Image (cartoon, rainbow, N blue to C red):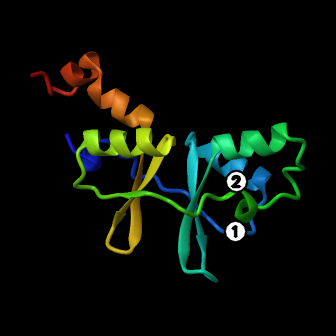
Amino acid sequence: MLVRDAMSTLVLTIGPAHTLRQAARLMSARRIGAAVVHDPDTCGLGIITERDILDAVGAGMDPDVETASTHTTTDVVFASPAWTLEEAAEAMTHGGFRHLIVLDGDGPVGIVSVRDIIRCWTPARRQTAGLTR
């Protein structure tokens, strides 16, 4: 099975000036655990996750003042839609993270999470989807 088969195509993209509260609200409304942060000044893509927000709030930072740019991971490992789920899982395990931005060309086309991979690897899920071996 490939990343394209498991990834979520709902990609929330925010700017670096979004506050952590704004990011959390947008992520919560979409029931997703990560957002792509696009910084037009650096032409780069980063990622902010629910854990980044939780760590900041837990450290006593003000979510109405702290911006996404301060908490964005910029040394991102990107996945290709053609990667196998095993390749994605290996990258996540090696890097110690739970989300990969999926790029096709220059732009993000999805995000794949550990949960997405587990969903595909769970026997009950495969049977429901008609993917039994």
- 123 horizontally vs 75: left or right: left
- 128 horizontally vs 28: left or right: left
Q: Secondary structure at mark 1?
A: loop
Position of residue 13 relative to residue 54, above or below, is below
Q: Which x, y percent locates residue 14?
A: 63, 64
Looking at the rendered structure, which numbered label has been put on residue 62?
none
Write the residue at 66% across / 51% down.
26
- 60 horizontally vs 73: left or right: right
Position of residue 120 relative to residue 47, above or below, is above
In contact (CB < 8 Å): disc 1 and disc 2: no
Q: Amino acid at mark 2?
A: Ala
Residue that numbered label 1 is attached to: 16
Q: Amino acid at mark 1?
A: Pro
Q: Which x, y percent locates residue 32?
A: 55, 42
Looking at the rendered structure, which numbered label has been put on residue 23?
2
Q: CA distance from mark 1 to mark 2?
A: 10 Å
Q: Which x, y percent locates residue 29?
A: 63, 44
Write the residue at 54% across / 62% down.
75
| In this rendering, the label closer to the viewer, 1 or 2 | 1
